[in-house]
Image (cartoon, rainbow, N blue to C red):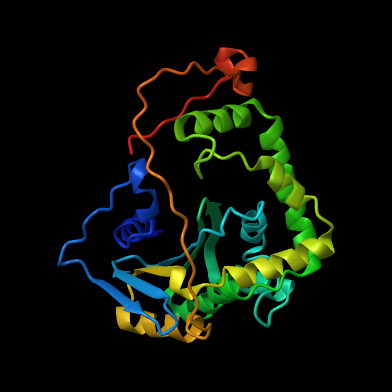
Amino acid sequence: MDISRRDLFKLALAGGCLHTVSSVGFAAPALTQSEPLTTVALDNGLRVHCYRNASRYISAALILRSKEIGAHGGLAHILEHTSFTGAAGNMTAAELKQKRRALIQDSNAMTSPGKLEWYATFLPKYASEALHLLAVTCLDQKFDQETVKSEARVVLEELLLDKYSSEGAIKRRFNSIIYGKDHPYGKDTLDSELAVAKMPVRKLAEELRRYADMIRLPANMDLFLVGNVEPHQICDLANVHFGKCPYASGPMLNVPRVERTHTHTRMSGIASNLSRPMGEIRIAWNTG
């Protein structure tokens, strides 16, 4: 199966999605003039970037940048988990899940400081329906209580595992030392995220709806589409499904530059894998 994730990531870099983290070493690759890149700005400010290649699938990534992502005690993390799972648009949670199984080959969402990302891979013949599903997931989640309850439980489990694992403690300390405790990448938000995940379901659903309204910012969004499709046709489809949301924009997260470290800080910790005999440890690597 020829999935176009490598080109999708290349396009995302070239489109400037990672410009806010240039201080930590990302470099955007240049696209040559011969590469079929098309960029269209919708009336509501959302930018659509289409890169044509020979893949049999379309890979889509919608990336939202806002300073509010990560600033509200983990609401973005729960919103990530309810994506492609809970009610959205005029679909119930059950209807959305059924459509996801029928239309989407692969889907996911992830959060990082200042950024929320959604990904989906689908066949070209499902492009219109799949883009609609992606649009309502990103722009019109309903946060039904059943979904919020189940996904908050999953998030709570993840956070508790992170809090009480030696690896989680090592990672948090490492980030604090490297970036500084007040830097977005070094700030420890675990306790505030736990408090949000433990909220009563009804209150949490209401908070999520208010938060989703706050970050519904099309002008802060970039939609990347990679596959063997006619660029203007797929951009027109994107306009149909994403252009309905009115214009809105907001400030993005300012990621301070991290200066080069000249001092040595000793740091040690016990990894759980090392509690077993060395002969049982499996080591894997790739060459990139």
Q: Is residue 177 above or below residue 275?
A: below
User: Does residue 100 lie above or below 151 as drawn?
Assistant: below
Q: How many numbered marks, from 0 up?
A: 0
**Image spot of residue 34 (x, y percent):** 15, 67
Image-quadrant location for residue 144: bottom right
* Residue 99 point in image, percent of width and height: 62, 74
- Residue drawn at 51 percent across, 45 percent down: 184
106 w.r.t. 132: above or below: above
Check the image and name the residue furthest to the left: 33
Q: Quadrant of the N terminus?
A: bottom left
Q: Position of residue 273 (x, y in %)?
A: 60, 22
Residue at image position (48%, 81%) is: 247
* Residue nearest the observer in this picture, 116 or 93: 116
Q: Residue at x 55, y 58 (%)?
A: 108
Q: Is residue 225 left or right of residue 277?
A: left
Give the side of residue 151 with respect to residue 14, left or right. Answer: right
Residue 230 visible to the viewer? no
Residue in front for this viewpoint, 284 or 224: 224
Query: The C terminus is located in which quarter?
Result: top left
Residue 198 in sight: yes
Please identify the quarter of the rendering in which residue 77 is found. bottom right
Residue sitting at 46 percent across and 18 percent down? 265
Q: Is residue 75 left or right of residue 181?
A: right
Frontmost residue, 83 versus 266: 266
Q: Position of residue 244 (x, y in %)?
A: 52, 86
Answer above or below: position of 287 versus 271: below
